[in-house]
């Protein structure tokens, strides 16, 4: 009887906390911002404590993969405790950096707020029609727009493109979405709005311009080639939109680029602040400013109410993010304290400099294919083999991003494949690896050859 009462009380407490998850999320974000900007240790303690609460609430509601990852993480933690190598102070000092990734992801989830308004959907449809009339194939237009919008909407861009495709190219919608995902694979190589890009920049210690100097030539050439491939694909507009283009179309195209530039400028004027913090604060400030200006211009509260709805949804639906990055923190930090990462470091250290690039591409891609998200994977590699300790850190940074681009197309576990599966109804293995391996493998090979060649010429 007591056990039943205890179980009932536990469920009641869990339900209560879930009902106020968005409040906990706000406290979590406030703790992240204040702990990043001040030296008051209390805010870091609040951030860590609330993050742990949200993590333990998230794991039971996450997927079986996330639950398995959490189990592996806590088994590793248990081994560290039994071996008496566990350092509580070091663990507590490093864990907030993993929760910081979740905080940035939650902010980025509302980055696309300004162009998610219904009127911009009309403009995107009109823009697609205008491009088609000028000889651009619908798949090329959808892939190009999906890449650009993906920088601020992440895989949410696929949802918007799916809406457009259903109305304009329904017979080739699935194929168009697959090409959109392939074009989107280039986004992390240049956009500082991508959390993996930001983390990679911080781990390698390079500047954003240094990343662009190495990555942009490959991005431009790869995107041009990808869009040329879509130009020879079949498909035509079946229901051309009649809407006229206005300045809303320019806003759709300009907003992602302007937001990238704003983050870059903010980082330029505050070089001592971690880029993850700059990203979260800058994006948050821009979104709030846009909402305020929109509210004043229309003299209604609808823009602010829409932002509040989107923000609350992001806070409530963050189970997967907390589950994977909380578990990644426990797993990587436990392995580090056990000394289990030493063989990985020795393996990379034994390679000649030109071979490190293909090894990084292969490790990130294969890790992703077998279920380890690229962010925990790069953190794991950096813990064993510091990525900043090289004469060519930009090459290693781009190698990580190339491996991620190939892996996200080849694995059934990525957000890209998961979203495509949800939109199309196809199995993740069919919409992911089965459709994209012929693109992902040349993508990885071309990126590797490009980076190795630069390394040999440097």
Image: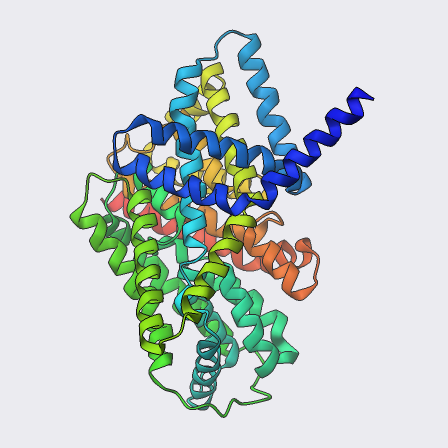
Which quadrant would the N terminus be assigned to in this image?
Answer: top right
Residue 444 image offset from top left, x and y in percent: 46, 51
Locate residue 404 relative to residue 19 in the image: left or right. Answer: left
Specify how the rendered protein is coloured.
rainbow
Residue 11 image offset from top left, x and y in percent: 70, 34
Examine the image and state in which quarter residue 272 appears: top left
- For this orientation, the residue located farthest to the left is 269
- Residue extending furthest top? 84
Residue 119 occupies which quadrant of the picture?
bottom left
Residue 366 left/right relative to 274: right
Pick the front one: 212 or 229? 212
In front: 280, or 27?
A: 27
What percent of the width, then of the height, locates residue 386?
A: 34, 29
Q: In the displayed structure, does residue 137 sit left or right of residue 356?
A: right
Q: Is residue 238 visible?
A: yes
Q: Is residue 161 above or below residue 84?
A: below
Q: Nearer the viewer, residue 107 or 156?
A: 107
Which quarter of the figure is the C terminus placed in?
A: top left
202 left or right, relative to 317: left
Residue 401 to residue 390: above or below:
below
Residue 137, position as x, y percentages in the image: 49, 81
- Residue at 24% x, 35% y: name it: 391
Residue at x 78%, y 22% (from the top left corner): 3
328 is higher (above) or lower (below) than 177: above
| Residue at x 57% of width, y 8% of height | 82
Seen at 70% across and 63% down, the residue is 425
241 and 130: which one is in front? 241
């Amino acid at each position: 009887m007591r056990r039943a009462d205890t179980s009932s009380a536990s469920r009641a407490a869990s339900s209560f906390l879930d009902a106020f998850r968005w409040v906990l999320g706000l406290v979590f974000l406030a703790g992240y911002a204040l702990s990043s900007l001040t030296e008051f240790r209390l805010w870091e303690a609040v951030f860590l404590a609330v993050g742990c609460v949200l993590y333990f609430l998230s794991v039971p509601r996450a997927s079986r993969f996330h639950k398995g990852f959490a189990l592996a993480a806590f088994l590793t933690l248990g081994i560290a405790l039994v071996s008496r190598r566990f350092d509580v102070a070091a663990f507590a000092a490093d864990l907030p950096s993993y929760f910081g990734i979740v905080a940035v992801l939650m902010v980025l989830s509302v980055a696309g707020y300004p162009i998610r308004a219904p009127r911009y959907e009309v403009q995107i449809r009109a823009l697609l029609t205008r491009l088609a009339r000028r000889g651009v194939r619908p798949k090329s237009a959808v892939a190009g727009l999906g890449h650009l919008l993906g920088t601020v909407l992440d895989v949410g861009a696929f949802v918007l493109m799916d809406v457009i495709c259903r109305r304009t190219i329904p017979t080739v919608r699935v194929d168009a979405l697959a090409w959109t995902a392939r074009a989107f694979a280039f986004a992390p190589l240049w956009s500082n709005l991508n959390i993996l890009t930001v983390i990679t920049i911080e781990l390698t210690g390079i500047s954003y311009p240094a990343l662009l100097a190495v990555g942009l030539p490959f991005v431009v050439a790869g995107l041009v080639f990808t869009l040329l491939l879509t130009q020879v694909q079949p498909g035509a507009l079946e229901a051309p939109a009649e809407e006229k283009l206005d300045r809303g179309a320019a806003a759709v195209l300009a907003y992602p680029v302007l937001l990238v530039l704003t983050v870059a400028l903010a980082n330029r004027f505050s070089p001592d602040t971690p880029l993850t913090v700059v990203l979260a604060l800058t994006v948050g400030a821009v979104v709030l400013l846009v909402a305020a200006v929109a509210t004043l211009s229309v003299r209604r509260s609808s823009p602010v109410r829409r932002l509040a709805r989107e923000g609350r949804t992001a806070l409530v639906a963050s189970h997967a993010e907390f589950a994977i990055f909380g578990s990644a923190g426990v797993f990587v930090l436990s392995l580090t304290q056990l000394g289990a990462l030493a063989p990985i470091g020795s393996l990379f250290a034994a390679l000649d400099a030109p071979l490190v690039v293909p090894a990084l591409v292969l490790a990130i891609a294969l890790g992703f294919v077998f279920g380890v998200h690229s962010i925990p994977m790069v953190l794991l590699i950096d813990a064993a083999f510091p990525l900043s300790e090289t004469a060519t850190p930009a090459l290693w940074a781009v190698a990580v991003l190339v491996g991620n681009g190939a892996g996200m197309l080849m694995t059934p576990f990525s957000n890209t494949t998961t979203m495509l599966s949800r939109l199309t109804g196809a199995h993740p293995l069919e919409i992911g690896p089965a459709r994209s391996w012929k693109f992902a493998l040349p993508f990885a090979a071309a990126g590797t050859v490009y980076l190795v060649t630069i390394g040999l010429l440097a």
